[in-house]
Image (cartoon, rainbow, N blue to C red):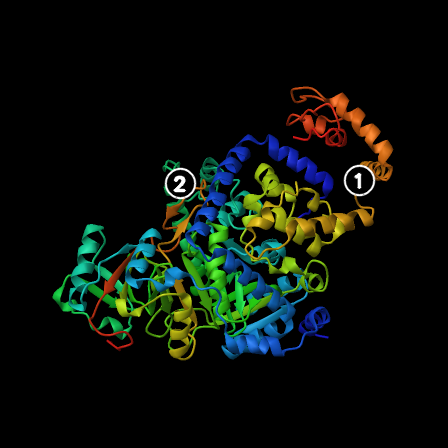
């Protein structure tokens, strides 16, 4: 997937704001997820205590990551699984292709996996003669439309129902052209029938993992549709792809995440299918894959472990931060330009892709702090975004106008008398009893909203006069 | 240096920890905060949560009444009386012959199957969740391929919280290839952000609660 730089970010954000159908979907979206999360949390009095525990488990795992990965590998192998260590995206692509080649596989049925998006797996496999079919409904429509996900839990949140109809009519040409396909139930029934064939014919099934359990050597997925389970049960081999930070110690720890992840993500008490997989099918089993592979991906994570961004590796990909983010809710996920959007993406993407490429993302924030309020593992997202901004500034990557502006402000801030004089002048100039609809040099602000009017005097002056209200 | 060693070296450089704490964590298996809802009346909580998740849940019936309950539900839902049923001997205790029109095919699921029938390892009251373990007599496909899934849960196999399930799982011996925790029928809100049941897995999940009058922990099979 190509990466959008700062100029692209501004352009795509502006495009998103002007995109009427997208704005309608985003308006629906911002009412949905956030409310359901709050309601689910209210039904479980222990929710806040569980969040603390979830944070502590992740901190413990990251502090002993080598130990737990070794233990996971050992137990996964003991159950007949194979573990593949991959330092980079390319290594992981090659490892997966090698498994497909050895099995003579032509088709892969895929459950939803953000890590597979991260490594650009589908395109790579296609170039090498292996067809990957997305089976999650949201991922499937994106594959038909040639788009990237715009949300990490609900990847097709930006696609309107009418666009599903259009894409299905264009892709499923073997079905009668006159069939009715307007309403969501008809669309879902057709997807179910079409994808059922894919599960049955695929040679390999691939899923992500929400967690890996060191104690048992298992991988765990949390899903609602059942496509992940069909993908991993029907084909001959099951490949799991997971970041190295996914490992947790025990089943007891998993229980904590079973209580916080679905509630934070969709407001469900538990996802419909929470599946633990350990090794390939056992002797006598009537179904299940004959091979079980776990591809462990580093791709920049180990380097984050030692620095200021370790806390970001606690992330369990629930998307609560983007569901709460005022910037995400205005522009959607595509403007962020890569797999991980919203606040978690603004912190993770520079960590994985480098500050040169993605250092501008942490600027897409109002620093309102809602993301940190809802994060189930309490990642200090605003704090880390500030960290990235400092690095971007220190490496002279921020735009010249921004740097000069900040320099000018610093000059004035260090000279209080001059600062007060200018602030007082500004307050008088902007003072009136209704907001400003237009201001010179501020069209970037007033183009989409009013600028608040000042009270006619500076804060310092009002404070001194004892008139602070 | 292998990829594994290179990754491990990077991780060790960043963590460099003593292992005692982690070894102790693994052996202690400390539990997180326990939801009070897991300690209430299990049958009522299980039923309420499973219904909230979209399941149909029967009142507890005796083993003798199970075939009739299933036949009545199938008729009401206009579903065929031919069931792909788990080979698990736990199903042998029910008097199927009293309902000759009910056909049980004891096998894995096939693509054309409309209804499946399985026993359960446990039901978890906390969230109305079913626990299914895979094995030679318990194919996984029965949980996912058919349109409708009928699951039999013995009331004495109801546990309060997930942690009790783990304890039972460990007591049962070697971990199975697959543990399926199922909470309601398959669903998706991907199309137009509206929740609909029956995405890829069963559209309907009918839970028959079986009260065989035996005490908890007894082997009724």
User: What distance separates the C-alpha of mark 2 from that of mark 1?
Assistant: 46 Å
Image: B95 above or below A162: below
**Chain where mark 1 sits:** A
Q: What SS does tag 2 mark?
A: helix
Image: A282 above or below A205: below
Q: Which residue is mark 2?
A: A184
Image quadrant for the C terminus of chain A? top right
Tell me the number on the disc at residue A399. 1
Which of pointers 2 and 1 lies earlier in the amino acid sequence?
2
Image: B196 above or below A434: below
> Which is nearer the eye, B188 or A147?
B188
Question: Measured from the top left, where is residue A93 in percent x and y?
Answer: 62, 61
> Which is nearer the eye, B159 or A45?
A45
Q: Residues within 10 Å of mark 2 (few under 14, many from 20)?
A: many
Question: Measured from the top left, where is residue A259 in percent x and y?
Answer: 46, 59
Question: Measured from the top left, where is residue B14 in percent x and y?
Answer: 71, 68
The answer to whether A211 appears left or right of A427 in the picture is left
């Amino acid at each position: 997937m190509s990466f959008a730089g700062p100029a692209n970010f501004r352009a795509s954000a502006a495009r998103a704001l002007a995109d009427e159908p997208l704005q309608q979907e985003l308006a629906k979206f911002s009412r949905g997820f956030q409310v359901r999360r709050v309601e689910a949390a209210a039904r479980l009095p222990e929710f806040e205590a569980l969040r603390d525990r979830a944070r502590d488990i992740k901190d413990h795992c990251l502090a002993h990551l080598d130990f737990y990965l070794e233990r996971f590998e050992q137990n996964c192998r003991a159950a007949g699984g194979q573990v593949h260590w991959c330092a980079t995206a390319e290594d992981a692509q090659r490892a997966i292709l090698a498994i497909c080649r050895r099995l003579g596989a032509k088709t892969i049925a895929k459950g939803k996996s953000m890590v597979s998006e991260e490594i650009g797996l589908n395109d790579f496999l296609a170039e090498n003669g292996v067809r990957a079919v997305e089976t999650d409904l949201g991922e499937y429509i994106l594959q038909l439309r040639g788009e990237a996900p715009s949300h990490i839990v609900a990847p097709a949140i930006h696609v309107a129902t009418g666009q599903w109809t259009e894409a299905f009519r264009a892709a499923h040409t073997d079905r009668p052209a006159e069939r009715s396909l307007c309403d969501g139930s008809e669309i879902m029934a057709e997807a179910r029938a079409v994808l059922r064939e894919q599960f049955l014919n695929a040679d390999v099934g691939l899923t992500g993992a929400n967690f890996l359990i060191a104690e048992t050597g298992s991988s765990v997925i949390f899903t609602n549709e059942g496509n992940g389970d069909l993908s991993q049960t029907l084909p001959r081999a099951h490949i799991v792809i997971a970041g190295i930070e996914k490992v947790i110690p025990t089943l007891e720890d998993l229980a904590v995440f079973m209580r916080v992840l679905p509630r934070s993500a969709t407001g469900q008490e538990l996802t419909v299918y929470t599946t633990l997989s350990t090794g390939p099918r056992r002797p006598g089993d009537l179904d299940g894959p004959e091979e079980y592979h776990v591809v462990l991906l580093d791709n920049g994570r180990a380097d984050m472990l030692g620095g200021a961004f370790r806390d970001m590796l606690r992330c369990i990909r629930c998307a609560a931060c983007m569901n709460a983010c005022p910037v995400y809710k205005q522009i959607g996920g595509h403007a962020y330009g890569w797999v991980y959007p919203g606040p978690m993406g603004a912190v993770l993407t520079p960590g994985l892709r480098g500050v040169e490429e993605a250092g501008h993302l942490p600027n897409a924030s109002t620093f309102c702090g809602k993301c940190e309020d809802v994060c189930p593992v309490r990642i200090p997202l605003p704090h880390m975004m500030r960290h990235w901004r400092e690095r971007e500034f220190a490496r002279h990557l921020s735009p010249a106008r921004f740097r000069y502006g900040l320099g000018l402000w610093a000059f004035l801030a260090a000279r209080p008398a001059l600062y007060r004089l200018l602030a007082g002048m500004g307050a008088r100039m902007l003072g009136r009893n209704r907001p400003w609809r237009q201001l010179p040099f501020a069209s970037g602000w007033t183009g989409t909203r009013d600028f608040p009017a000042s009270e006619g005097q500076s804060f310092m002056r009002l404070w001194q006069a004892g008139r602070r209200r | 240096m292998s990829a594994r060693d290179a990754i491990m070296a990077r991780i060790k450089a960043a963590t460099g920890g003593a292992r005692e704490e982690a070894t102790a964590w693994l052996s202690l298996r400390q539990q997180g905060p326990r939801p009070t809802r897991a300690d209430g009346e299990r049958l009522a909580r299980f039923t309420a949560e499973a219904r909230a998740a979209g399941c149909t849940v029967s009142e507890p019936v005796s083993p003798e009444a199970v075939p009739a309950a299933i036949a009545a539900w199938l008729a009401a839902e206009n579903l065929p009386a031919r069931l792909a049923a788990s080979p698990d001997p736990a199903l042998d205790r029910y008097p199927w012959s009293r309902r000759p029109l009910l056909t049980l095919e004891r096998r894995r699921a096939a693509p054309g199957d409309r209804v499946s029938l399985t026993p359960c390892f446990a039901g978890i009251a906390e969230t109305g969740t079913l626990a299914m373990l895979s094995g030679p007599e318990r194919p996984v496909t029965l949980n996912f391929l058919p349109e409708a899934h009928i699951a039999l849960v013995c009331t004495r196999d109801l546990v309060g919280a997930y942690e009790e399930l783990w304890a039972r799982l460990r007591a049962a011996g070697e971990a199975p290839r697959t543990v399926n925790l199922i909470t309601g029928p398959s669903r998706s809100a991907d199309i137009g952000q509206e929740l609909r049941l029956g995405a890829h897995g069963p559209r309907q999940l009918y839970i028959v609660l079986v009260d065989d009058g035996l005490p908890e922990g007894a082997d009724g099979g």
